[in-house]
Image (cartoon, rainbow, N blue to C red):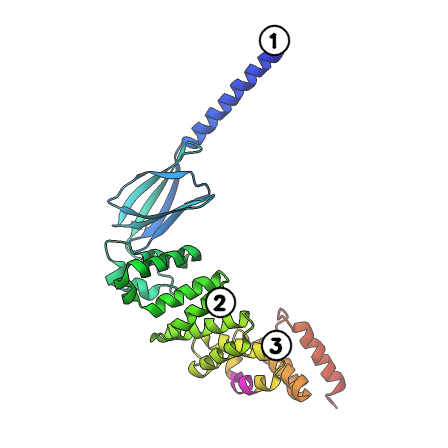
Amino acid sequence: MKKNYKHFILAIIFSIIFFICNIFIFSQNIKNIKTVYLNSIFTIQFDSNSWIIQSIDKDFLTLVSKDLSYDTVSFHFKPKKTGKTDIEFYDMYRKGTITYYIEINENFDVNPGYSNNYIEDKSISNSNTTSNFDIAFFLFSNGIYQDAINYFIKGKENEPLIYNQIGSHKIAYYLGLCYFNLKQYIIASSYFAISKLSKDEEIKLYSYYYMAKTQLILKNHDIALDNLYYLIYSLKPKDTLYDNSYFLISSIYFEKEDYEHIILIVYPKIDILDNSPYKDYFNYYLAISYYEGRKDFYVAYSFLKKITNTAFEFYSKVQELIKNIETNFLDFH
C-alpha cells in the first residue's frame, strides 16, 4: 500500500514539473519579424481564438479590426508611420506570449490584379483613418472573400462619400468576384450585371468575361455566348482577355458539337490564336470540326499535325486520328 502511495506521489510531482517546464518554455517570447508597408493593412492570425493583444505602440499601429471565429482569431493592423515597433500577444489558455517585431517601410507593393486603382487614389488611401473599403480590398486580395463582402457592404451603408468616390460599378465588380470565388454564382451574376455598365473599360470587359464564365457554370450557354460575342468583337489580340474569350466560346460550341460555328469563329483568327497558350485546343477544335463536321480529312490532318505537345489533354486522341487519316484517307504515293 505504501509502495503504491509513493508511486502516486511521484507521478503527481513529475506531472507538476512537466507542466511547469511547458509553461516556462512556452512563456519565453517567440520572436517573429514581419515587414509591412505604410499604406497597407496587414494581418496576424492565430490558430486558437484565445489570443489577445498584450501591448501595442499606438504611435506606430492602429488595430483596424479583430475577427473572431470558432477556432481562429485574426488581427488587422494599419501602420501610421515608418519605423520599427512590436506587438506582444498573450495566449489566455496556454499562458504564454509571442512578440511580433514589425518593420514599417515607405512603399507598398500593390497587387495589380485587385485594388491597384483604388490604392493609388491618394485622397482615400493616405487618410489618417481606415475605411471599411480599405479593409474590404485587403481581405479580397488575400482571398478572404466572405469577410470582404461584409466590409464592402458596411462601407456602402456607412461611408457614402467614399463609396461614390470609388464608384458603384467598381464595388459591384469586386462583390461579384467575391461571390464567384465563393461559388455563389447566381448572386455573382447579379453584381456582374451592374458592373457591366461601368464607364471604366477594364472593369466593363472583365465584367462581361466573368458574367460569361458564371453563366457557363450555370449551364446558361446562350447568355454566356451573348457576353462572349461582345468580348470577341470588342477586344484586340494584344488584350489580356482575347485568348480566353475565344477559348471559352469555342469550348461551348465544341461541347454542343456545333462545328460550323467553330470554323466560322476560330478559323479566320488561327494565325493569331496559334500564339495563344490555348493553341493546341484551337487546332484540335478545328481538326474535329473538319473531321466530324465537314468530313474534310485533309484539312483536319493539317491541324492535327500542328499539335506536338505530348502533355496536351487530347494528345492520344490526336495521334489516333492522325494514324486513321494516314491509313485510310491520305495517298503518300
The residue depicted at 33 percent of the width and 53 percent of the height is: 41
For the residue marked with disc 3, what is the amino acid?
Glu
Which range is magenta?
A: 264-271
Q: Which residue: 33% across, 76% down?
A: 199
Residue type of the residue flagged with mark 2: Ile
Q: Position of residue 24 (x, y in %)?
A: 43, 27
Per the rendering, the mark at residue 186 is 2
Residue 144: which quarter of the image? Answer: bottom left
Q: Which mark is residue 2?
A: 1
Q: Earlier in the sequence, mark 2 or mark 3?
A: 2
Q: Earlier in the sequence, mark 2 or mark 1?
A: 1
- Mark 1, Cα crowd under 10 Å, few <14 / some 14-19 / many 20+, is few
Q: Is residue 275 visible?
A: no
Residue in the picture at 56% in, 72% down: 219
> Is 107 colored magenta in this rendering?
no
Judge depth for marks 2 and 1 and give the one in front.
2
CB atoms at circles 1 and 3 under 8 Å apart? no
Q: CA distance from mark 2 to mark 3?
A: 22 Å
Chief secondary structure of the magenta span?
Answer: helix
* Vertical placement of residue 230 versus 132, above or below: below
**Count of residue discs:** 3
Secondary structure of residue under mark 1: helix
The CA distance from mark 2 to mark 1 is: 74 Å
**Residue 111 in view in this figure:** yes
